[in-house]
Amino acid sequence: MNTCHFKRGALPVCLSFLSALCITNVQAADAAKKEPWQLAQETEVWEPVPPVIQASANAAPSDAIVLFDGKNLNQWQAAEGGGAAGWKIADGAVTVTPKKGDIKTKESFCDVQLHIEWKTPTNFIGDDGKPQESQGRSNSGVFFQERYEIQVLDSYNNKTYPNGQVGSVYKQSIPLVNAARAPGEWQTYDIVFTAPKFDSAQKLTAPGYVTVLHNGVLVQNHFEIQGATEWIGKPVYKAHGCAPLRLQDHGNLVSFRNIWVRKL
Ligand code: MG
């Protein structure tokens, strides 16, 4: 009820206001009667209960899909042509094998958490006898949905354009810091990727986002992806569905190990 009575020379008295005031007073009185633990219970949420997983040190979480455990490339194929992935495996790692081309997962993914370890070679002398520099030194890349590259590069004492250095969203976002380790040392990427969404008319309805930890350090913080990462030209979105994870053959001997994803 929202009724107000008017009297000459007096303030209007509203029943709805009095009613609300009355209820508030009752609630306050009830609250005053309760013990603190009873009040605390009112904001406890008991459902749903998160599933239990095993998250052991130095092992993939039990709910992860292991994409490479050092033994074989059964989960991978050549990115072009769909034949067998031709990169060499040795000592529990797989190394880019130049001219074999990119490799990609057989399975397609949308939103994921990815863990991947990689190492750049200590010898980065080019065919011309000079040290490779800038983008030419130990370049590879982790592509989400075959389109969105997180750069892999030897950025240890190697100047290049910052939006193309290690930890960058290639040509879109400079990393917050350079957390590069020296060549020959294993490094880690832990990446949360949220896929862009498109409607039935192929129109973008939500951009992609990416958060990247390089060697445990935050280098991309929920960056809004601008479109496919391009070497030349501005990024643009073109509608697509879930798609494979892709690793780049840029002609350099970059190695990878311990690759796993969790679907989100
Ligand atoms: Mg690259």
Image: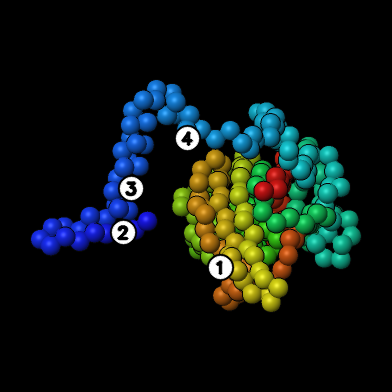
- The reply to whether callout 3 and callout 4 are in contact (CB within 8 Å) is no
Left or right position of 101 against 229: right
Q: Which of marks 2 and 1 is in front?
A: 2
Q: Residues within 10 Å of mark 3 (few under 14, many from 20)?
A: few
Q: Is mark 1 within 8 Å of ligand 1?
A: no
**Residue 83 percent coordinates (x, y):** 89, 60
Q: Which of marks 3 and 1 is in front?
A: 3
Instruction: Say which element carries label 3.
Output: helix
Q: Is mark 2 within 8 Å of ligand 1?
A: no
Q: Residue at x 61, y 49 (%)?
A: 191
Q: Which label belongs to residue 3?
A: 2
Left or right position of 32 against 69: left
Q: Nearer the viewer, mark 2 or mark 4?
A: 2
Going from the N terminus, do you reach mark 3 or mark 2 first? Answer: 2
Q: Residue at x 60, y 61 (%)?
A: 208
Q: Does the residue labelled 3 lie within 8 Å of ligand 1?
A: no
Where residue 164 sits, quadrant-wise, is bottom right
Amino acid type, callout 2: Thr
Q: CA gap, disc 2 to disc 1?
A: 55 Å
Q: Which of marks 3 and 4 is in front?
A: 3
**Residue 167 percent coordinates (x, y):** 55, 53
Residue under label 3, please give it: 20
Residue under label 1, please give it: 226
Q: Which label belongs to residue 43?
A: 4
Amino acid type, callout 4: Thr
Q: How crowded is mark 4: few (under 14 residues within 10 Å), some or many (20 or more)?
A: few
Going from the N terminus, do you reach mark 2 or mark 4 first? Answer: 2
